[in-house]
Image (cartoon, grey):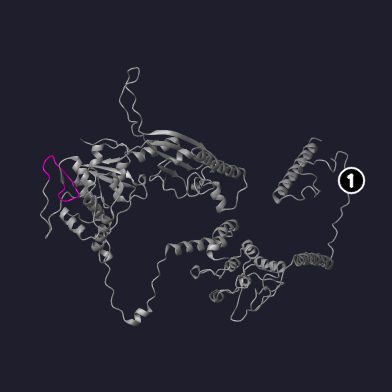
Amino acid sequence: MSHQFQQYHLFSLPRDLLDTLVPRNDFNQVPEPSTPPRTGTPPPPPQPTAGSRACNICLGAVFVDVDDQRAHFRSDWHRYNVKIRLNGGEPVAEAQFAQLVDGLEDSISGSASSSDSDSDDSDAVAALVHKTRKLARPSSPESSTPKLPQTPLVWFHSPPSTQVGIYKAVFSSSTPPTEYLAELKQMQIGGEYGRTWALFMTAGGHFAGAIVRVKRPDGDEDDGGLTKKGKSRKPKPEIEVLKHKTFHRYTTRRKQGGSQGLNDNAKSKAVSAGAMLRRYGEQALRDDIRNLLQDWADDIHDCERIWIRASVSNRRIFLDYENAVIEKGDERLRTFPFPTRRPTQAELSRCLQELTRVKVSHLTEEALRAQDEALLASLPKPKPQPAPAPQPEAAKQKDKPAVPQLSPEEEQLRDKWTRLLDMIKRGRLDTLKTFWDREGAALGGVNTPVPDWTDEKGGTLLQVAAHCGQEEITKWLLEDLRADPTLDVPSSTVAAEDDSGVESDGDVPRLPRGKGGRRTAYELARTKAVRDVFRRCAAAHPDWWDWLGTEHGARVPSVLSSEMEEGREEKKKARRKGLKDKVKEREKEREAASPPPPPPPVEEPKPRKAKEEPANGPRKLGGASGTTESVAGLTPEMRAKIERERRARAAEARMKALQGGGRA
């Protein structure tokens, strides 16, 4: 039967195709049908005759019918050859396998059993493969085979020219790659209630969820009968949506990206109306999703796989909260192994089709072999390492020791310290409180020395906070956690730290350094506000520590009570008032020393004519020739224009006078 140009459903593969599938190894190479004989090995196996069946992995395996071929696929010999080929080795003939088995102390039993429960590898096969790996292990890393990039698909080959690809995420996480084929065959069984999946997506305030049946129960197949009206029955769909729900909340500012919660964590909380609406939308979206999960709890409990598409922050909506329906470490949890778009019902359907539709290609074994060889040739070859030249003993002693490899526990501890110090430097007090409540005991307490690899200016958390100028965090460490302010700053920090850039206290003298240059957290403070935190705490809790001690104390010069602060404010006000009074006195002295300005000349008022316009009324452009008030305050250009008007009117008056005298 030809399988070309067909689409297969993952849970309804044809039996004739399923029986002929063989896995491809890590390098996606098709198993060789035969290998040339070796020296000292048995003669080459007989070639299969026309119409007979053969195994493409095991040497000389020829079968009469399908049942014989199935029994061979369940045998230990075949499983051993499959494991060896997946590890890049060469398969062995049946006689060689028998010799290898004789060399083991444990015997292999039931290799020819036809029970389905024998799909798990026996201990003897695993021991034999482990022994073969040790014998074939290369002596140097340069001879190791280069690894190909990991792909989300696992491929199977069906002779002569059919390949099927299935997403690895579909299989159980506890199933090794060698057992994918056995689990694929098990997927064709629907059971009494069928197989169901749960799919959830959320992003940008959009949510889409569904409970789908991907495999009908056994016995619920199409019978091809007729309805009561004599019409042919409509075939039942392979995939059935049992429940689905979509909704949307306003959580993201348009064209800005990122949720309001992430923006609040990165910056200070915005107080705009839009920000408040987005915060309400995030809370409503979280409540809606969790209520939906609670309503679907029974269906989710029976699901075989749970697919979730969500960001790191949005995954907390589904997991890790009180009375959560889905546990955080649930083995059924999966993420979609391909890009997805906005969460909608149509997108869920598309993703479900992508997961359950088997990828099919039709390449001959020669074409696959050429493709694999080209892929292997394109990989970068490891550079040969030259043999190290012999070094004298003196040179070997001068070599720096190699950096030790960190264990997972040490890497996790370093990550916690890095996050803790970053919160202190950035002044994130609320986040720091939550983190300390969870991890403070594991890190050793508030007075635990900061690790040397951090290169911080301070040996404790209090010293780091004081040096960074974080006033609120310093106060929290001193008053809430009772951090010890009397601990000495490490000598390396004292040597590297100087007094440059430190704000001075005008009313508090600086103490001289103690013996050996001793310094404390107070002296690492670079701002006056942080130093006042130490002084206030010393005044409020004098019995906690030796605040004023110089040799073994905290080296705080003096305390700062509330009365002292009030007095200091009064002094500042009096000083400001005195400065203002001095300024006023200087101005008065300056006025008294300078001679008074001469009074402005007073002009006698001229008698107005009967037809003259009132002095306070509007005047014509130009005005009287003898007045100066009309041009006062004008620009030179305006003054010149007014002067031209005056001259023109005077010339016009003279012309009229001459004309009147001539007529007389």
Q: Quadrant of residue 534?
A: bottom right
Q: Which segment is the magenta one?
A: 48-61
The spot of residue 566 in percent (x, y) is: 77, 64
Q: Closer to the camera, 369 or 134?
A: 134
From this view, report whether residue 447 is shown above or below residue 323. Answer: below
The spot of residue 482 in percent (x, y) is: 63, 66
In the rendered view of the protein, which quadrant contains the N terminus?
A: top left
- Asked if the magenta segment contains residue 55, the reply would be yes
Q: Closer to the camera, 521 or 129?
A: 129
Q: Quadrant of residue 353?
A: top left
What residue is at 36 percent from the left and 50 percent from the top?
174
In the rendered view of the protein, which quadrant contains the C terminus?
A: top right
- Asked if the magenta segment contains residue 220, the reply would be no
The spot of residue 61 in percent (x, y) is: 16, 48
- 356 with respect to 79 (left or right): right
Q: Closer to the camera, 516 or 64?
A: 64
Q: Main secondary structure of the magenta part?
A: loop
Question: On the image, numbered disc 1 is attached to which residue?
Answer: 607
The spot of residue 408 in percent (x, y) is: 43, 62
Residue 208 visible? The answer is no
- Disc 1 residue type (three-letter): Pro
- 169 with respect to 146 (left or right): right
What residue is at 12 percent from the left and 51 percent from the top?
45
What residue is at 72 percent from the left and 72 percent from the top?
507
From this view, report whether residue 73 is shown above or below residue 238. Answer: below
